[in-house]
Image (tube, rainbow, N blue to C red):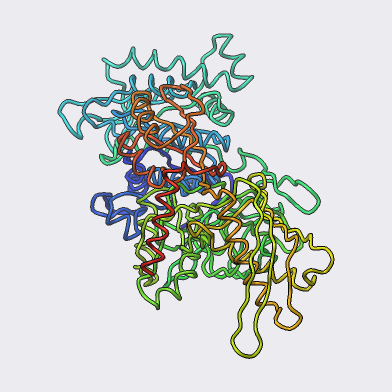
Amino acid sequence: MKEYHTKQLRNIVLLGHGSVGKTSLAEAMLFTSGAINRMGEVENGTTVADFDEEEIRRHISLNLALVPVEWEDCKINVLDTPGYTDFVGEAKSAIRVADLALILVDAVSGVEVGTELVWGFAEEQKLPRIVVVNKMNRENANLDRTLEVLREAFGQNFVPVQLPIGAEGPGDGNLAGVVDLVSMQALMGPEGKGTEIPADMASQAEEARVPLIEAAAEADDELIMKYLEEEELTEEEIQRGLRAAILNGTAIPVLVTAATANQGLRALLDALVAYAPSPVDRGPVTALTAAGEEQIEPNELAPLAALVFKTTADPYVGRLTYFRVYGGMVESDSRVYNGRAEEEERLGQLYVMRGKEQIPVPHLRTGDIGAVAKLTYTLTGDTLCDKGHTVSLTGPVFPSPLFAVAANPTSKADQAKLGPTLTRICEEDPTLHWHQESSTRQTILEGMGEAHVDIAVRRMKNRFGVGVEISIPKVPYRETITRIQADQYRHKKQTGGAGQFAEVHMRLEPLPRDTGFEYEWKVFGGAISRSFESSIQKGVKRVMGQGVIAGYPVVDVKAVVYDGKEHPVDSKDIAFQVAGREVFKKVMLEAGPVLLEPICKVTITVPEEYTGDIMGDLNTKRARVQGMDQRAGKSITTALVPLAEMQRYATDLRSLTQGRGIFSMELDHYEDVPAHLAQQIIEAHQREKETR
């Protein structure tokens, strides 16, 4: 692979709903550029970008993959991303380091939920966009209808740069070439051979060219003057204007392709070289330093700043760290500094990745994307810089997990390896989280959906040899009291020799929600020595961790020790621990104990036709709807729902909406469990205790 300077680089992320053909498009780009001899297929697992064994098994992309394409003296770093909502973390990582989003839509299906999701992500990052209408060789493919739907959904100025040229015959023959509205030529077949526009399309092409010229002229002051004076814009001027329009978001060009038939690919690659912004066009990025903010210019004289956007863990290859250089130049066999970890990292051989293929390079210039193996301290989101000039770039922001399982190791050997393996899996994919839930004593693995977690579990087994069984996690309930109550407990034990004696008088008071635990000592006149204060507190804390009514932690309680008795010989630390524990249990059972359950704030976005189904389902889940909104044919519902009812909502929503709904969920607060449900939980706990 030859060397490219910053101006010759194009960092492009492929985004879209699942199965719109992103991976096939990346494959067709490689084939058209001559990098591969034959096009692989997603269905038989032979594409460059889908190389993971799970991707091959499932015939879908699960990870972002880097596919550099060399074309017309430029290097296009294509970041292929998964389209399924379970894997949005991969898309967010790629968007963070791209300079242009190439958003694919299906020529028949048009704008889908996944399209809107990734459009929103690109908007968050203020990323310039081009739309590619793919699968133009499908029956019923319709560019005009797709443009109409795009305008309706996003309200932007979508401008076709190409028109599809149809051909007789069904199937793959339906796209014979494209009309390039800039050069006003017909580009026919996979070779993109330039010829005259078919006579029956000439007037359509002239008509479609007008808004294109207007969009190009409006983005450049010099061109708008020329246009208003009714002078003809040259091809080079139109390209310059379009490039500016893309960069400032005033127009979004629309191109057409049929990736699997390799139609429209040369025109697409030419358009990316001509219109896509280079890192220089995107300008400086803001980094944080000890002194405040600093602008990192996109050139090799700037301070070194390289953002890590992906980490993969493999027991054979080791850890592979993907990064983009924003300033300076990164050299093979050099040293860099990680400001977050406050550690120096030694870089070995640098690579440019082509799928799983590692192409060694001596250095990576500003704007380029590459990888390095076996870094010790660096994680996704970290910035690599010079030790003498520490800077930090903002990493990708990942969504909160939506789906949780309890992970139980299948053997004693797996138990020992479970923690380290979960940590490695979660380092590789920051949308996976794991923790030990103390209230239920379970190991919890969280992800974006059932498939996401299932794949993580399979990888643990296949890559690291750690087997786990998964189950629905117990809900992390809590226990508290509803009224003030006081009582006493005497602990007396005589076993020949030294005995044990302690008497404690305790009052419990409910505290406001989320206050935690307070402990107060109000013993006067030396009824109990102050030295036993911590012993009683220790006993209380032990029982608070284990629960009193159903085995869940006790919260929002104030314990006041106001009296008691001790024995000059038999009173000791252990006696007061026991008395503290038992008096707390006794008083709590008399103080109106209740169970608290986690209540989540849930935002559900679905096409309007599913609103009734969603509302009906929420009514069965004890939900309290907080608000409803309509936006671009989508219904957005906000509700407060108990976590107990939402454990498998990712799966429920998918089946209710045929995969067209999305939701987000975050813990909002805890509140009382209804009495009839609390009784069932308490009884289940009693049964579990008896079977132990």
Question: Looking at the picture, does residue 661 appear above or below residue 673?
Answer: above
Farthest residue, direction bottom: 497
Q: Is residue 304 visible?
A: yes
Q: Position of residue 463 (x, y in %)?
A: 38, 68
- Left or right? Give the position of 290 relative to 287: right
Residue 126 versus residue 563: which sits nearer the camera?
A: 563
- Left or right? Give the position of 173 relative to 158: left
Residue 173 versus residue 149: which sits nearer the camera?
A: 149
Q: Position of residue 10 (x, y in %)?
A: 51, 44
- When asked about the image quadrant of residue 580, the answer is bottom right
- Left or right? Give the position of 405 relative to 193: right
Q: Position of residue 486 (x, y in %)?
A: 66, 55
Question: Looking at the picture, does residue 500 appear above or below residue 403?
Answer: below
Q: Is residue 78 visible?
A: no
Question: Looking at the picture, does residue 501 appear above or below residue 114?
Answer: below
- Residue visible at 57% across and 31% down? 247
- Residue visible at 34% across and 19% down? 144
Residue 364 versus residue 449: which sits nearer the camera?
A: 449
Farthest residue, direction left: 169
Position of the C terminus by quadrant? bottom left
